[in-house]
Amino acid sequence: MASPAVMNNYGARSTTLVRGDGCYLWDDQQRRYLDALAGIAVCGLGHSHPEVAAAIADQAGTLLHCSNYFNIPKQEQLADKLQALSGMSNMVFGNSGAEANEAAIKLARLHGHRNGIANPTVVVANQSFHGRTLATLSATGNPKVHAGFEPLVSGFCRVAYNDIAAIEAAAAANPDICAVMVEPIQGEGGIRVPDKDYLQKIRALCDSHDWLMICDEIQTGNGRTGRYFAYQHSAILPDVVTTAKGLGNGMPIGVCLVAGRADGLMQPGSHGTTFGGNPLACAAALATINVIERDQLAARAAELGLYFASAFCEQIGSHPAVKEIRGVGLMIGIELHRDCGELFQWALEAGVVLNVTAGNTIRLLPALTMSNAQADQVIAAVIALIDQHHAQTAQAD
């Protein structure tokens, strides 16, 4: 029973998790679950990774926090590492994906004002998700996220995802556009994978109009799609990249990286944070990245993603309940013809953690360290759940 002292913004929760190890979780009844969600793409190395745990413990016993009034060696080491991995110029740290995206929106407005635009406008996509703060929920292309929080923050223009013509039409109609903010793959929107040249075409449009290209890689970054960042599949360099989730393997940390037109927009006093980039968070992120690189986990994500995709396409590609199977690396979505939110609880009862997004899409975001044998268990469980759901809905008809 949840404590009444905790606000009920997540609704009823029936399971209490108390321990994790690798791809497994245990509840307070000592029931074990195979985790195919990784804390929503957070624990890319699995739970309780010994090298991350050791880095956190060592840093906590040395210097847990200091303000950004001082040089922070671990922050500088992490920035150097991310600069090398991304090809970006420099970055500012925060505590979450929403904060990283707030920084990106501020950069867009700075760029717009620098170009003499009084009301800078950022193009965003329908079905996108950029966060829960007022600015990032306003950028999000989902009316459900907006409900009750109006008036929204102004300065956003929404267009269809994976539709370059829609961005071109927006450009023709609105001279105040200063940036395009896009997820390389829409996660919360249902694992929506755009055309292969989508990001390249956005890059070209931004270049022709002197806009910032902002890639929201909160979920797609840190090896999940088979490259360290998903934009690297398209051989382009954005002006702004944001990431969080898998960066600290569970330790809250976010980062907004800049290059090109965005480099130099932030000046002393224009942005800041109390906790962002502190020694503890940066120690965890450094340890996480070191393991991703050493163990070649981005390549492993690509390999295991193909394993999942092949199995699902072969076994349920023509299933009457299945509308489409989508994914890149270890971002996998199985869209059903009917809403299937109840599958979250059904999966728990079957000993598997997954979730349902966009109402009717089973979303799998397993750890990059998951074995093929564990993947086989997830595949079997998901297929059984789809069969069960189809049988029940057919009976109801």
Image (spheres, rainbow, N blue to C red):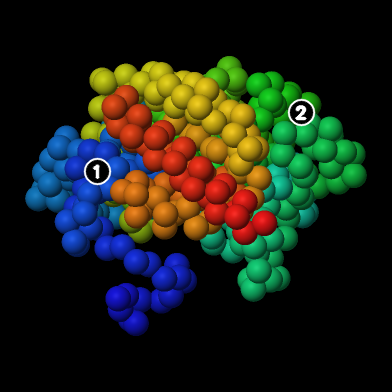
**Residue underneath mark 2:** 205
In the figure, residue 378 lies in which quadrant? top left
From the viewer's side, name the closer residue of 196 and 111: 196
Cα separation, mark 2 vs mark 1, equals 45 Å
From the viewer's side, name the closer residue of 179 and 379: 379
- Does label 2 or label 1 sit earlier along the sequence? 1
Q: Residue at x 32, y 75 (%)?
A: 2
Relative height, residue 292 to residue 365 (above, below): above
Seen from this angle, which residue lies furthest bottom?
A: 4
**Residue underneath mark 1:** 24
Relative height, residue 45 to residue 28 (above, below): above
Q: Residue at x 19, y 61 (%)?
A: 29
Q: Which amino acid does label 2 sit on?
A: Leu
383 vs 147, left or right, is left
337 vs 216, left or right, is right
Q: Quadrant of the C terminus?
A: bottom right
**SS category of the residue bearing label 2:** helix
Neighbor class of circle 1 (other Cα within 10 Å; few <14, some 14-19, many 20+) is many
Q: Residue at x 66, y 30 (%)?
A: 194
Neighbor class of circle 2 (other Cα within 10 Å; few <14, some 14-19, many 20+) is many
In the figure, residue 168 lies in which quadrant? top right
From the viewer's side, name the closer residue of 124 and 390: 390
In the figure, residue 10 lies in which quadrant? bottom left
Residue 13, image x, y percentages: 37, 67
Q: Which amino acid does label 1 sit on?
A: Tyr
Residue 340, image x, y percentages: 56, 53
41 vs 186, left or right, is left
Q: Which of marks 2 and 1 is in front?
A: 1
Residue 127, image x, y percentages: 67, 48
**SS category of the residue bearing label 1:** strand
